[in-house]
Image (tube, coloured by chain):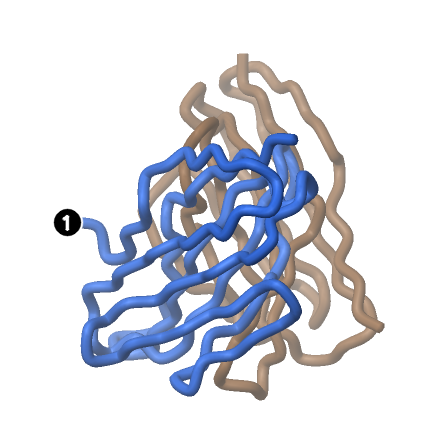
Chain colours: A blue, B brown
């Protein structure tokens, strides 16, 4: 079992749809959590940090459930420009520093 | 503001040839630095990270090595490339003093080993 698992995707949605990405992590010592966006053949770019209290940035909402070891990203009113791969990232420091990237979920938003 | 540079952007090398990829960061001091590889259609794999000059931690055994000769310079090397070394190599940095550790990526080097 992978330490960070995401929905395999791809997701194909029309413009204006609401899309939810899910991510689970297996190591309870994980300490910080992020969502990144990666466009085709480009570097990942930080989209949001994920806090226990949840956080929102415009159309994007991220939530963390430590008890269930679960992270989510919600995109409302999706745009064509939201088409990309969304990566869940988990950091932990036990046994030395470790950053683990999920495999990513590809999103296609269509007109 | 902080910027991160990587070069070259693309590279085609024969099997058995050496490799040197360079990454530099501007606008910050004492960053943590990272090297990742992303194989085609796959997720990112952390190869090395460094918390200071001369301090390198390796995540997976492989044909590669890393060095940090200066505070904001990180180099990825190989003495003899393998076909399996092909991939998208990404350098990243994070604030050294912050435990939250958002990482910021450079534009990457796309390496093809023939």
- For residue A22, above or below residue B41: below
Assign a secondary structure to mark 1.
loop
At which x and y percent is residue A10? 41, 33
Q: Nearer the viewer, residue A85 or A82?
A: A82
Chain of the residue on which disc 1 is drawn? A
- Residue A102 lies left or right of residue B33; in this view the side is left
Q: Nearer the viewer, residue A41 or A48?
A: A48
Q: What residue is at 60 percent from the left and 61 percent from the top? A: A46
Q: What residue is at 66 percent from the left and 69 percent from the top? A: A58
Crowding at dot 1, Cα within 10 Å, few <14 / some 14-19 / many 20+, comes out as few
At which x and y percent is residue B35? 54, 52
Report which residue position mark 1 lands on.
A1
Q: In the rendered image, which quarter is residue B54 located in?
A: bottom right
Q: What residue is at 60 percent from the left and 27 percent from the top? A: B111
- Residue A24 lies left or right of residue B84; in this view the side is left
The residue furthest left is A1
- For residue B30, above or below residue B42: below
- Residue A98 lies left or right of residue B88; in this view the side is left
Q: What residue is at 56 percent from the left and 36 percent from the top? A: A14
- Quarter of the picture containing the C terminus of chain A is top right
Q: Is residue B108 visible?
A: no
Q: Is residue B45 visible?
A: yes
At which x and y percent is residue B108? 66, 42
Q: In the rendered image, which quarter is residue A95 located in?
A: bottom left
At which x and y percent is residue A100? 37, 58
In this rendering, the count of numbered labels is: 1
């Amino acid at each position: 079992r992978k330490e960070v698992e995401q929905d395999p995707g791809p997701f194909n949605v029309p413009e204006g749809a609401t899309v939810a990405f899910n991510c689970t992590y297996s190591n309870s010592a994980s300490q910080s959590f992020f969502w990144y966006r990666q466009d085709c053949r480009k570097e990942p770019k930080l989209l949001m940090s994920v806090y226990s209290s949840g956080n929102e940035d415009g159309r994007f909402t991220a939530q963390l459930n430590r008890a269930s070891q679960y992270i989510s990203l919600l995109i409302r009113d999706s745009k064509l420009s939201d088409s990309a791969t969304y990566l869940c990232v988990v950091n932990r420091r036990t046994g030395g520093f470790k950053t683990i990237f999920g495999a990513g979920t590809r999103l296609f938003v269509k007109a | 503001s902080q910027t991160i540079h990587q070069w070259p952007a693309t590279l085609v090398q024969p099997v058995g040839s050496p490799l040197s990829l360079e990454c530099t960061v501007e606008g910050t001091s004492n960053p943590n630095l990272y090297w990742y590889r992303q194989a085609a259609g796959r997720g990112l794999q952390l190869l090395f990270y460094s918390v200071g000059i001369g301090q390198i931690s390796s995540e997976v055994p492989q044909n590669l090595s890393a060095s940090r000769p200066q505070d904001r310079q990180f180099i990825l090397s190989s003495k003899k490339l393998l076909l399996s070394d092909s991939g998208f190599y990404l350098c990243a940095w994070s604030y050294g003093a912050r435990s939250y550790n958002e990482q910021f990526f450079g534009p990457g080097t796309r390496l093809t080993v023939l």
